[in-house]
Amino acid sequence: MKIAIICYPTHGGSGVVATELGVELGRRGHEVHFISYSSPFRLHGFQQNVYYHEVDVSAYPLFKYPPYSLSLATKIMQITKDFSLDIIHAHYAIPHAVSAYLARQMLGGSTPKIVTTLHGTDITLVGKDATSFEVVKFSIEKSDGVTAVSNYLAQRTRDEFSLSKEIRTIHNFVDTDRFSGVVTDCNVKQFAPNNEKLLMHTSNFRPVKHLTDTIRIFALVRKHVPARLILVGEGPDRQASYDLAQELGVLEDVLYLGTQDYIENLLGCADLFLLPSGEESFGLAALEAMSCKTPVIGSNIGGLPEVIDNNINGFLHPLGDVEGMANSALELLTNDGLMQSFREEARKKAIEAFAAEKIIPRYEEFYREILNI
Ligand code: GMT
């Protein structure tokens, strides 16, 4: 099949899933065309059957807000014509699914088919907002096929938008060979010179991630065991987390590493991963940690219970229960036998439920159904 993948190129779950999917599809012999405003950050080097087309946005002085959605639609239309695409796969409803629909309208037909994958905040935050509700609903209704990354998100979408349309759950996936927990480039000693326990969190530090809760959990843990916290990412809540770490007297043990392209090398170094988010449609970061044998402690919200089995391969606590999360962290960090069992169970869940080779065929199957082939 000839497939265009429209995604955000920046660090963020939807872009990661879109990129990893495109690369895997290319390996399986499909022709894949990424379309975005810059090259997706996880698209490293040459990949078999994978091409990239950059969207140019005009910066005409009259435009207070350059119309990216229109430039994207124009680019999709052009690539569709030049490469006879079968499928346009839009990741994240806004503006990708809308631009895909506009491109097809401009082409004047019913091909290529449009598949939209809903990732989370496109429904739970952005989509709910009055400024985008109707256009998100429209883009879902006009897509030939819609997938969501968890059962939770599929149901939430149907409820929020009063939709009866099928929304198929296709969970996030992970390359379990790459995310194996085998530490190569990362030197644990560099982060934990005195054998401190290593806790880790990675995200784009938006308010939805409750980064300050991560700091609070860490501060409670550190009262009882020597520990350090590795923070990977950048975003609006970085400063608030920094200030809080300083206020709680733990800043010297919080390591801000910025955004990292090869997170698999770091995850293998960590003892525990913290994800106390307020919203999480799936929690790809948690899955990648689990695949590296790093158990996750998170909030019992959204799609996280589909990923983490409480008290088996991680712990889930009510949103904001910082004390409960810290206690669970301590339980694991002070009991080697329990930790070992959680580590093995985490890896097992990643392999059995979410390995790339199990999930990618579900997308291929969905494309074929939509194309009727
Ligand atoms: O919130 C993020 O960190 C990024 C966001 C995105 O859309 O780029 O991630 C969402 O998509 C991921 C991939 O499908 C999911 O695993 C994340 O749970 C989801 N984030 C939220 O729902 C907050």
Image: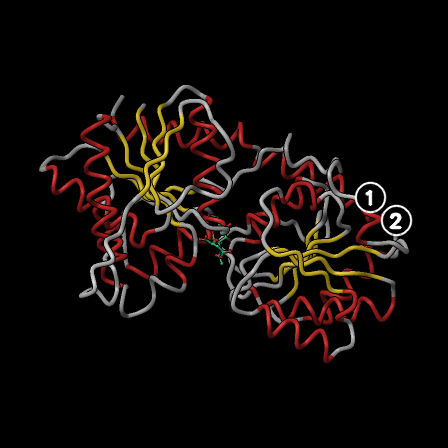
Locate the C terminus by quadrant.
Answer: top left
Give the percent coordinates (x, y) of residue 138: 21, 54
Query: What residue sits right under mark 2 in the picture?
Result: 336
Left or right of residue 371, residue 33 in this image: right
Residue 117 in view in this figure: no
Q: Secondary structure at mark 1?
A: helix
Left or right of residue 120, residue 54 in this image: left
Q: Does the numbered disc 2 mark a residue whose Cβ is under 8 Å from ligand 1? A: no
Q: Residue at horizontal 44%, vertical 21%? A: 28
According to the image, what is the colour scheme of the structure? Answer: secondary structure
Q: Front-most of 47 and 137? A: 47
Give the percent coordinates (x, y) of residue 89: 32, 38
Query: What residue sits right under mark 1 in the picture?
Result: 340
List the single residue furthest toward the top.
29
Q: Quadrant of residue 31?
A: top left
Locate the N terminus by quadrant.
Answer: top left
Q: Residues within 10 Å of mark 2 (few under 14, many from 20)?
A: few
Q: Front-most of 141 and 117? A: 117
Which numbered marker is on residue 268? none
Q: Residues within 10 Å of mark 1 (few under 14, many from 20)?
A: some
Give the percent coordinates (x, y) of residue 256: 67, 60
List the single residue furthest toward the right.
194
Amino acid at pointer 1: Gln
Give the percent coordinates (x, y) of residue 16: 49, 43
Cβ atoms under marks 1 and 2 closer than 8 Å = yes
Q: Residue at horizontal 87%, vertical 46%? A: 337
Left or right of residue 9, residue 370 in this image: left
Amino acid at pointer 2: Asp
